[in-house]
Amino acid sequence: MQSIKIINTSNNEVFYATEKSVGFDIAADESVLILPLQVKKIKTGLKWKIEDNSELISIKEAAKLVKCCTSTIHRQCKKGRLNFEKIDGVYFINKDHLLSYFNNEEIIDLPEKYELQIRPRSSSLLKEKLHIQIGTIDPDYTGEICIIAQNISFKPKLILKGERIAQGIISKVCLAENVFSRNIIRNNNGFGSTGK
């Protein structure tokens, strides 16, 4: 099982406005003056982290659980079909992944992937004349979450520290099977962290 955590290093409260809200409110962690038509990046003091909380079990325990021999489990690990960790040369299997793998007749188990979507609040454009850039925060991004905002009015707009400016929505995504990964090393520079 994976757990998703929002790490808050600001003094602003992070919350869902109602029990049925799908987006949590994101506030500015700094006061920013945005001139007419100017675009600025606003810090939030937020990060996100996805952790795998699944229990790790030995190959022997795994074989007993799914009623097969240890060599079958070991072979599936070596082929990359089972999630495992190698600790001091010993294989430990991800229990949730193991059960999902052996319960599926076609033996296909796609790892769950998530994105954190940045979206404007409903009132941003209509009431505040503030355009909030929609964005995707990838699961391997480790930097601070920032919001890109543009003032589309003819007057300077002051955003105060603690003012709610956007919302975050966590969503499960599917990846295309025929698009390969370049495995670019991501830096922590925030926007454009995988290069041009």
Image (cartoon, rainbow, N blue to C red):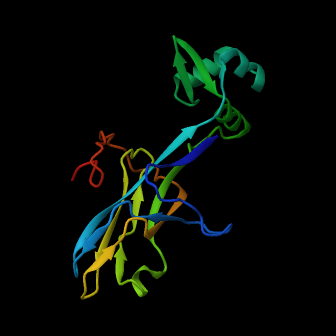
Residue 119 visible: yes
Horizontally, is 108 left or right of 147 in the view? right
Horizontally, is 85 left or right of 55 in the view? left
For the N terminus, the quadrant is top right
Q: Residue at x 47, y 57 (%)?
A: 116
Query: In front here: 17 or 134?
Result: 17
The percent coordinates of residue 64 (x first, y second) are 77, 19
The percent coordinates of residue 153 (x first, y second) are 28, 86
Q: Residue at x 26, y 53 (%)?
A: 192
Quarter assignment of residue 94: top right
Compared to 140, does 164 lie above or below? below
Query: In front here: 144 or 102?
Result: 144
Horizontally, is 189 left or right of 84 in the view? left
Residue 67 visible: no
Q: Residue at x 47, y 75 (%)?
A: 121
Callout count: 0
Compared to 106, does 178 lie above or below? below
Quarter assignment of residue 69: top right
Horizontally, is 8 left or right of 96 in the view? left
Query: In front here: 41 or 196?
Result: 41
The percent coordinates of residue 105 (x first, y second) are 71, 40
Q: Residue at x 52, y 54 (%)?
A: 174
The percent coordinates of residue 111 (x first, y second) are 56, 42
